[in-house]
Image (cartoon, grey):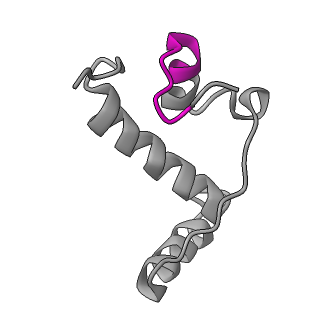
Amino acid sequence: MKDLAICRSPEKRQNLITGTGLISIGLKLISVKLPEALIEGMDELVRRGLYPSRSAILRAAVRDLLKRELWGEGGKLEEE
């Protein structure tokens, strides 16, 4: 699979932006160390029913970060 960190494919990028197609492109397990306060906040979002899991929260956060920092407003790859 091509590097999804850059994700030059508009279709795959749109799937990540909209949160669709995650199963079709595959998910990989990563380990992340977070401060307890962040974990407690994530657990509260799950308790309130805003997200189904911690994983869903992290996927949304990373997707939003990539959309803002890498892909820009229009969802396109920002060239350096």
Please state if 74 lies on the left or on the right of 60 as rendered. Answer: left
Percent x, y of residue 7: 50, 25
Q: Is residue 60 above or below residue 33?
A: above
Q: Is residue 17 left or right of residue 1?
A: left
Residue 46 picture quarter: bottom right
Q: Kindly identify the residue that appears in the image at 61 percent across and 72 percent down.
A: 47
Quarter of the image where the N terminus is located: top right
In the image, 39 versus 70, the foreground residue is: 70
Question: Where residue 39 sits: x, y (%)?
Answer: 52, 78
Looking at the image, the residue that sits furthest to the bottom is 36
Residue 25 x %, y %: 72, 28
**Which residue is pictured at 53% across the width and 77% down the height?**
33
Q: Quadrant of residue 37?
A: bottom left
- The residue depicted at 53 percent of the width and 14 percent of the height is 9
Residue bounds of the magenta highlight: 4-14
Residue 27 at x, y = what percent? 73, 43
Location of the C terminus by quadrant is top left
Work out whether residue 10 or residue 51 is closer to the camera in this orientation and state it. Answer: 10
**Count of labels in the image:** 0
Would you place residue 66 above or below residue 8 in this image?
Answer: below
Judge whether residue 37 is colored magenta. no
* Direction from residue 32 to residue 74 in the image, left or right: left
Q: Quadrant of residue 16?
A: top right
